[in-house]
Amino acid sequence: MLSPHVTFNGQCREAFQFYAQLFGGVTGTMLSWADSPMADQVPENRRGEILHASLRLGDRELCGADVAPEQYVRSEGILIILEPADPATAERWFSALAEGGTVEMPLQETFWAARFGVLRDRFGVPWEINCGKAH
């Protein structure tokens, strides 16, 4: 099994709460630095940030963490693909993820998909939504 691990600049908790609500996922872990044995290894002002988060989405898992501001690098060269079951779900997910983010390719019908679009959400995470055509 592959599990994408996304890094954040202090927004992991907010992002994972948003993703859980949007996708109907189940939060597995939401471990802050303060609640870990490593609490004394980060500055006091970062102890509320997330050391490890996991979100179960069907048979897949999305993981994430907050990294030190000087270590944070915006994700480039990779997208997380979402494959909604129907165009209405694709449109709902795309709209919610696009709010406050950047649309790179608007959601639209293509020769291979009922809906396809690419965006970066407000947390800096790159997504590709690909809703296949019914056969």
Image (tube, rainbow, N blue to C red):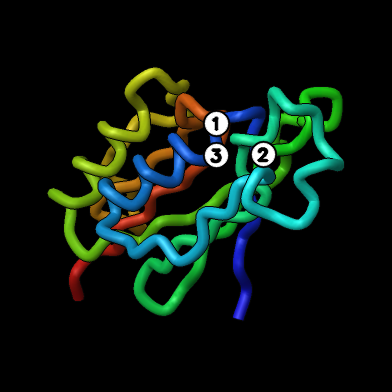
Residue at (58, 58) in percent of width and height:
63
Residue at (49, 43) in percent of width and height:
127
Q: Where is residue 62 in the image (x, y as percent from the top left)?
A: 52, 60
Q: Where is residue 17 in the image (x, y as percent from the top left)?
A: 37, 44
Q: Considering depth in this image, is 20 or 119 the residue closer to the camera? A: 20
As drawn, 1 above or below 105: below
SS at mark 3 in the image: helix
Residues tagged 2 and 3 counted as in contact (Cβ below 8 A): yes
Residue occupied by mark 1: 11
Residue 2 located left or right of residue 26: right
Give neighbour class at mark 3: few <14, some 14-19, many 20+ (Cα, 10 Å): many
Q: Considering depth in this image, is 95 or 19 the residue closer to the camera? A: 19
Residues tagged 1 and 3 counted as in contact (Cβ below 8 A): yes
SS at mark 1 in the image: loop
Residue type at mark 3? Cys
Quadrant housing the N terminus: bottom right
Q: Give how far apart the Cα atoms at labels 1 and 2 are.
A: 7 Å
Give neighbour class at mark 2: few <14, some 14-19, many 20+ (Cα, 10 Å): many
Residue type at mark 2? Asp
Residue occupied by mark 2: 66
Q: Which mark is residue 25?
A: none
Q: Give how far apart the Cα atoms at labels 1 and 3 are.
A: 4 Å
Q: Considering depth in this image, is 93 or 20 the residue closer to the camera? A: 20
Give neighbour class at mark 1: few <14, some 14-19, many 20+ (Cα, 10 Å): some
Residue occupied by mark 3: 12
Quadrant housing the C terminus: bottom left
Residues tagged 1 and 2 counted as in contact (Cβ below 8 A): yes
As drawn, 63 above or below 34: below
